[in-house]
Amino acid sequence: MNNHLKNRLVFIFLAAVVLSACTSTGDIFVSGQRTQADRNIAELERVIVPLEALGANEARSRQNDLTAARQLVTQLERESSADADYSGKLIAWSGRLAIMEGRYSEAQRLYRQSISVSPANIPSVILSIRLEGDPAKRLEIIERELALLGPRSSGIGELNIERGRSLFETNRFAESAGAFDVAFASGINPVYRDSYLTFRNRAWELRNTTGVTSGSIGLLGRETISWNDCIVLTKNETQLLRFLTAGRNISDTELFNRLVERSFIPYIQDITILQWTAARPRADEVVTRAGAAWFIWHLYAEARADHGMLSRYSARFATGANPRSPIADVPPLSPFFDSILGCVETEFMSLPDGRNFRPALPMRGAELLSVLRRIDN
């Protein structure tokens, strides 16, 4: 082989090595940018998703969290990036935050800006869904977008979170729970599961709710209910108040007064009291688990025509020199002792940790209706 050919081959080899090195370095650089962009998006999810799960009204009460989220968005916006997809996503996340800040016009502007920079990026799709006020129309957008994505595509999880939310709002609870499960299994950021698991469990709890009147359905998803709400659920969904109404249409206010007068609603919900106060309860007062147990157990005794049930447990546990309680946080001399033990023993209500009743926690609408229906049947 002559020297000219040898030199030419060496040159080609060295050029290939240099080109390969440059290409690898470029790949590493691009990969590094992408990794940092992904980290930034994950950080936005960490601070914004929990606020979105609360809903706009509740999120606005978390002003410190909103401010921290906006500061993070502003910081990331100041960092220049040549990645159009990342920039479009960042703008969309800013729009999603603007909705919770009550700046809807700004959110719409940011949506238009996001899709002009990076058409059809998933955060902008979610932003468009959240800007739509009608749950049925939101579902149409979601189903269309899911049809465009493959079953393993990025964005499946986020879209199914939105699908679960919208199905819940349209009272399609079983489908809602299923959508959340699909989202959680998709490899989505764990912050979504942490933020929406309670939402999913509430949908699962309501999945078998059938025949509920329109006046009651809105109460079932609530984490807190009032005495007025208890009356609405009992009157609309059971026959347990017929001993007061005899089939006549009596106003909720009158029913509340009659229930108080006949001790079906306690004057106070503090289980540590030994005597009732003179103050009457308010109809709009939040019902605790202790208050709900009192209401449930008195209705159960009335339904069975057995008023001896109202003192059954105190006669067994709360007499003698050293009265005792089998439930750690329920005093044996409390007026609520019989009602709480009765509800636990009949499995109308449970001990959340297997030991304590947690009497001061609020009662949920779906949980109350479930118990009322069991009594009514």
Image: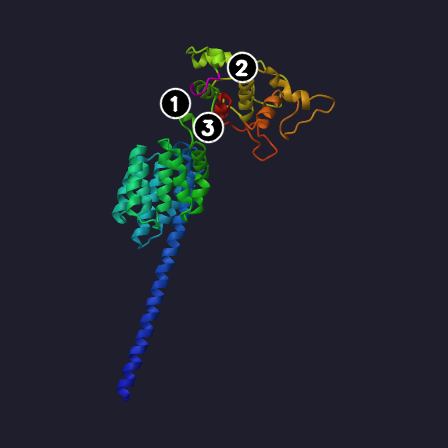
User: Distance from label 1 to label 2 (Cα)?
Assistant: 30 Å
Asked which quadrant contains residue 294, the reply is top right
Residue 99 visible in the picture = yes
Whether tag 3 and tag 1 are in contact, CB under 8 A, the answer is: no
Residue 238 painted magenta = yes
Find disc 3 in the rendering and name its residue.
Answer: 366
Residue 85 in the image: state x and y as whole percent. 31, 51
What residue type is disc 3 on? Ala
Crowding at mark 2 (Cα within 10 Å: few <14, some 14-19, many 20+): some
Q: Earlier in the sequence, mark 1 or mark 2?
A: 1
Q: Residue furthest toward the bottom?
A: 2
Q: Which residue is mark 2?
A: 280
Mark carried by residue 370: none
**Disc 3 packing (10 Å; few <14; some 14–19; many ≥20):** many
- Tell me which segment is drawn in magenta: 236-240
Q: Earlier in the sequence, mark 2 or mark 3?
A: 2
> Is residue 47 left or right of 298 when viewed as pictured?
left
